[in-house]
Image (cartoon, coloured by chain):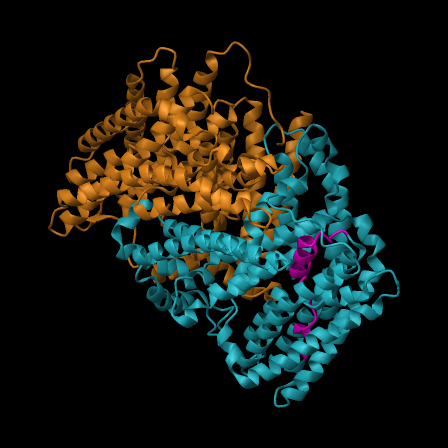
Chain colours: A cyan, B orange
Amino acid sequence: MARILTTRRLFFALVVIASFWIANLPASGDSTDQAVPDTMMAADEVADPVEPIQELTEDSHGATEETASEHGENEATGGHGSSEVSDVLLGLIIILLAAKIGGDVVERFKQPAVLGELIIGMVIGNLVLVGIDVFEPFKHSLTLEVLAEIGVIILLFQVGLESSIKEMMKVGLASFMVAVFGVVAPFFLGWGVAAWFLPEESIYVHIFIGATLTATSVGITARVLRDIGKIKTKEAKIILGAAVIDDIMGLVILAVVAGIITAASGGGELSSGGIFWIVFKAVAFVVGALVIGNFLAPKILKVGSKMHVQGILLSIALMICFTLAFLAGMIGLAPIVGAFAAGLILDKVHYKVFTERGDHGISELIEPIAIFLVPIFFVRMGMMVQLETFGQMDILFFAGVLTIIAILSKQACSLAIFDKNINRIAIGLGMIPRGEVGLIFAGIGAKLMYDGHPVISASTFSAVVIMVIVTTLVTPPFLKLSMLKTEKEPPPKEVTGI
Amino acid sequence: MARILTTRRLFFALVVIASFWIANLPASGDSTDQAVPDTMMAADEVADPVEPIQELTEDSHGATEETASEHGENEATGGHGSSEVSDVLLGLIIILLAAKIGGDVVERFKQPAVLGELIIGMVIGNLVLVGIDVFEPFKHSLTLEVLAEIGVIILLFQVGLESSIKEMMKVGLASFMVAVFGVVAPFFLGWGVAAWFLPEESIYVHIFIGATLTATSVGITARVLRDIGKIKTKEAKIILGAAVIDDIMGLVILAVVAGIITAASGGGELSSGGIFWIVFKAVAFVVGALVIGNFLAPKILKVGSKMHVQGILLSIALMICFTLAFLAGMIGLAPIVGAFAAGLILDKVHYKVFTERGDHGISELIEPIAIFLVPIFFVRMGMMVQLETFGQMDILFFAGVLTIIAILSKQACSLAIFDKNINRIAIGLGMIPRGEVGLIFAGIGAKLMYDGHPVISASTFSAVVIMVIVTTLVTPPFLKLSMLKTEKEPPPKEVTGI
């Protein structure tokens, strides 16, 4: 009871901040709505029926411009972008507070903190349904979106740091087999279900929905495994390796399907050379990053160790992480694939010269940045969920079937494991979440036009969003249950603070 | 020689990244130029003659949108904002690399790293003059601007952490006197010089230029004092205290002057009650933040120590920092004032319960975030400098006089110190830099209209920018010389890595 009271006190603080903000920016909610179409039309040329992803533009900037000029004296704080700074600061305060409250509450029920972050994000993101629209601007802040992306990049970098190429090689074949099973089954099952439910749509729509079901969102699983202290188990390595590989496979399928549709709507066809090129680039990137990175990283670190400035080890680590994330994006892969590769490359032996003279290791240096940025991604992902789509029955039904297919089809992964000592169920469960990758796929489908219509219609988009939410929400408790059930003793002792 | 070669190797890496980027985004330079007016006109209603600050809009987003659709396959990386993520990642890579190279080079000449960051920022920011426009988009990225702002907020928070309210009280009177001298002298001298050089302009313009010279940019001085290991000296405390106080005074003057001009251009007058209200709010914020924060912080930390989630100490520290920075912005002060107050409040004794159970202290936890974000602010500030304004003789002359006045008038600060044991010269020197505060003032003046013209014209703006650059550049070497000259031994041993 006393515990609940203290949490409630923090809630009061949130309310105080929020009401202060309402009092100071009375017109903000309205002016956001007003500013969206203006700014968006200027920036985007294509009008778009899908809102959830589309809205993430720079409109909040335009909105705060207006608000600032309505309240002349706020201009004294600075030039351009300073009202954006205020908005981002408020967003960060609310997200950090929400993350810690949500995390604390679910940890009391022995669930991983990430689930609490998602749920509290869903709550504050949907308060608009009961008329509270103070949190709306934070959904549309481009800066918070980018910070969230950097957060998930940092998370995957951390996960990569906790493993090494050598260790990954040991589970390489298992991961590869798991990934293949985990891509083939959802792809064809998803395709089949889409053909059954949406017979009036073209084959491209069916294929695209199949592709949307393929890629595992490694972020959620990685967080769960880290939260319960199981990130170094063999199961964790297989799942993470498989998630990275199926991410690559999924993105290759997506690139190929999108290429075929683009060619088909233009009356042409994607050449087999084009398909080969897409596949080649993806594989070459991952292999190249690991081989070249593994060769270059020690050399870069050696140069760095001779430099006279402070913070050089962390700066180099961040540069390598961001460079591979950036290159992955350039090549058409998700930036997190590059960040994970960067983490694999940076082995402790490579920067021994730093730790031997008393510096902290990279994992320790990156942790505070992760504490700051990672929750932004998960709270924000919860905030983007639109609970009102849950009210339409036909969408709900299609979504339900899609979700069941998404969950069951990934259980095919456990068939790829022959080693009896490995928890096969946990591997199937760990591959369930589609998270941000599913949303990204659906968003691309919503923009892709075939025969004058978007490949992913607004209602199909909602169904995919629901599938993503459910697969993301069910994974943490079940994975935790499965990973811990073999143990006799209670879960590892709780760590508070860092 | 070998040393130069290794640095050169890092430069090669930069060139490789840059050329990769050029190869992939051939139309980026042009499309940026195209996108600026479109997006700006939609967002801003006031047409504006001043470019340097005005350009910091969301145009880079619009530009990358275009680029992405030209390179269809990049779309496979994600939905909206993912090209912004790529841009920000590349910007971060370049800024981190530049900061470390610049810092390393100047540290070899025994200069503080911040000077190297500024200079290398000026270099890459002005490569456009020799036809290299690859770095242009990073000047216009709203996200990088916000990250830079968060960086300077974190820096001031760190500086505040290194001191405490009790210690500040000891130098309180000295700081206050220094601040008063350091505001009064530049304000009236600046006003006089403006009246002498710009007789055709109204008295409001003269007053405004005087106000632009008042506020010290504590960021530069704080960095220099940290870099040379002198942040805990009595001189440092007086300077930092005075810089905060004169920031508040400067912002009050600015708010009052802006209020008078707005009232005058509307035909009315700012009431004395209005002036009182502005002054009252500023003083009330600082006193209130310290008193209430000092009372609340231990209680919040106590609640946090009972929570079950990881990273709670750092999260609470960041929340307090961001909350006070946000509130300072709301009240019309610079957010850094709030961040500094937050650092002062968070005394080690308040979070003993965390450190006693083995957690790291707040200073140690915040350091990696500072290593990541602080250089963004200084490199970016260098990048915003437009070297071409140095070519116009009349602007240069006015700028020269303004700069001399800015430097000399702050030496009045040393007159406020009667204690013979304190290095008075260092205090006068430490108060010289105007940095971002001067730029912010000038930017506000450029938007403020009187009699149909902006109060700060385009050429006056250039002169102010030059003044800001020179005061910022001369401070580090002179301050370092003055602070270290009393010592017999060489500067403290170099710290590499952290």
**Depth check, front residue: B336 or A429:** A429
The residue at the point 46 percent across, 40 percent down is B298
Residue A93 seen by the camera:
yes
Relative to A439, A29 lies left or right: left
The one nearer the camera, A284 or B339, is B339
B155 up-or-down from A62: above or below: above
A323 up-or-down from A177: above or below: above
Residue B27 visible in this rendered orientation of the protein = no
The residue nearer to you, when weighing A481 against B445, is A481
Outermost residue toward the bottom? A200
Q: Residue A192: give x, y in percent of width and height.
A: 71, 84
Residue A89 percent across, percent down from the top left: 43, 50
Q: How many marks?
A: 0
Name the residue located 81 percent from the left edge and 65 percent from the top edge: A424
> On screen, B174 above or below B297?
above
Residue A431 placement (x, y as % from top left): 72, 66
- Residue at x-position 81% and y-position 63%: A423
Q: Is residue A430 left or right of residue B317?
A: right
B130 over B112 or under it: above or below = below
Quadrant position of residue A114 = bottom right
Between residues A442 and A378, which one lies in front from this camera angle? A378
Q: Which residues are magenta?
A: A207-232
Q: Main secondary structure of the magenta part?
A: helix
Q: Quadrant of the C terminus of chain A?
A: top right
Q: Quadrant of residue B242?
A: top left
Query: Is residue A176 shown in magenta?
Result: no
Image x and y of residue A461, in percent? 56, 76
